[in-house]
Amino acid sequence: MSEHENHHHEEHAQRTPSALELRVRALEARLTEKGYIDPAALDVLIDTYQTKIGPRNGARVVARAWADPEFRRGLLQDATAAIASLGFAGRQGEHMVAVENTPEVHNMVVCTLCSCYPWSVLGLPPTWYKSAPYRARAVKDPRGVLKEFGVELPPATQIRIWDSTAEVRYLVLPLRPAGTEHLNVGELANLVTRDSMIGTGLPKSA
Amino acid sequence: MTYRSHADLGGQDVPGAIVQEPEGEYFHSPWEQRVMALVVAMGPTGMSNIDMNRATRETLPNYRDLSYYEIWLAALEKLASEKGVLSDTPPKPQQVMRADAVLATIKKGFPASRPASHPARFSVGCNVRAAAVQPEHHTRLPAYARGKMGVVERVHGVHVFPDTNARGLSESPQWLYTVKFAAREIWGESVRAPNSIISVDAFEPYLEPA
C-alpha cells in the first residue's frame, strides 16, 4: 500500500469505519464470545509494544557493550543470557545472537521468508523491514539497500547478511562512534538508532 | 496438490523503494494494533502454532497484494475457521491470556529449543550442501540457498522443526545450524557485492555433507 493510500485510509477511518476495521472488530468479538480472547489483554499488549518494549531496550544493550568490555564479551558469547541480565528477555528474543561490526565487517539483518525480528530488544518491526523490496534485495544487493538508507561503506568492507530463517534473532552491535569516551551509558544509548541495530544504519555521531 | 509459498522473496526482482519510517511509528491504523494483539494473544490458546501461522500466511493466494497486518488478519481468520474455533462447539483453549498475565507471558517467551536426543551430525567448520529439492510443504530453507555449498559457523542446539510442526504432525526437534554462504556461490560471479556473506539458520535435514 502506498503512502498516499495509507493517508487516504486514515482520513477515511475518521469518518466511518473502514471495511478492515469492521472485519477486525467482528473477529475480535467472535473470538471473545468463544472464550479465546480477553479484550482487556489486547489493550495491555498494545500499550506494552507501544511504550515498554521497543528499540530503546536494544540501545541500552549496545551502550552497555560499548562501555563495559566484560558485558560485550558476554553478549558476543551468549547474547540471550547477556540481554536477560538487563531485563530484556522475552517473546521473539528467546534465542539471541549479537553480531559485531568492525572496521572490516558490517552486519545487516533480514528475514526473507516472513518478518522475524528481535521484538524483545527492538520492539515491533518497521513496515519496510516486512516489505517485499527489503526482503528481496537485502540478500542480493546489500550495498544498494544501504545506499537507500544513506549509508555508503568503503568498497573493501565485507557485508554479512543474517537471514533469520529459524527462531534465532539477531542484534547488530554497531561500531562505537569516535569521540564518545567521555559519555556514560545513558548518553551512549541516545546515539544508538533502531536502524543501526538492524544494520541498515549507523549510530549518530557524538 | 502443490504447496506454494508466496513469501520466499530473497533475491527476487521486486520493484519499489524501501520506504523508511521513523523510530516509534509502529502502526498506521488502529485496526493494525488490534490485529497484532489478537495474534499475540492467540498464541497461548493452542489454536495453532507459529509454524502453522507462517504456513497459512505464506500460502494466501493474494499474499503479495496485502499489507503485512492484512496478511496476519487473513491468516488468523482462516485458521480460526479451519480449527473450529468459530463453530458452535469450539475446542477449549489451552490458556487464555489475561490482562494481568500479559507482561509475564511476554517476558517468559516461547522458546523453540528442546532437549537433544542424538548427537549433532555437523560441527563448526563442516562443509555442507543445502538440499536441492523444494519440499511440498512449509519449510524454512530459502530458495536462493537450495543446492548451494556453505560452511557451518554455529551450532544452536535442537529446535522445533517447522516442516513437521506446521503440518500439525509433531515437533520432531532437529539440530539447528547457522550456515554461511559466499555471495558468489549463491548469486554467481556477477554479484554486486562479491565479498559479502549470507548466513541462514538451517535445520539438519536441510543439509548434506559436502
Image (tube, coloured by chain):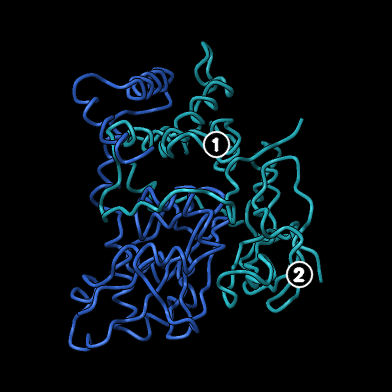
Whether residue B206 sits left or right of residue A89 in the image: it is right
Residue pictured at 73% horizontal, 67% vertical: B120
The kind of secondary structure element at disc 1 is: helix
Residue B178, quarter of the rendered image: bottom right
Instruction: Tell me: residue B33, above or below residue A206.
Output: above
Give how far apart the Cα atoms at labels 1 and 2 are: 30 Å
Query: x and y percent of residue A125 in the render?
Result: 38, 51
| Pointer 1 with pointer 2, Cβ within 8 A | no
Chain A, hue in figure: blue
| Residue at numbered disc 2 | B128
| Placement of the C terminus of chain A among the 4 image quadrants | bottom left
Circles 1 and 2 on the same subunit: yes
Q: Is residue A11 visible?
A: yes
Chain-order first, disc 1 or disc 2: 1
Q: Does residue B120 appear to the left or right of A112 in the view shown?
A: right
Residue at image coords 27%, 20%: A17
- Label 1: chain? B
x, y percent for residue B26: 30, 46
* Residue located at (52% from left, 37% from top): B64
Q: Which label belongs to residue B57?
A: 1
Does residue B23 appear to the left or right of B116 in the view shown? left
Chain letter, cyan in picture: B
Density class for disc 1 (Cα within 10 Å; few <14, some 14-19, many ≥20) is many
Expressed as whole percent of the image width and height from the top left, the position of residue B67 reads 43, 37
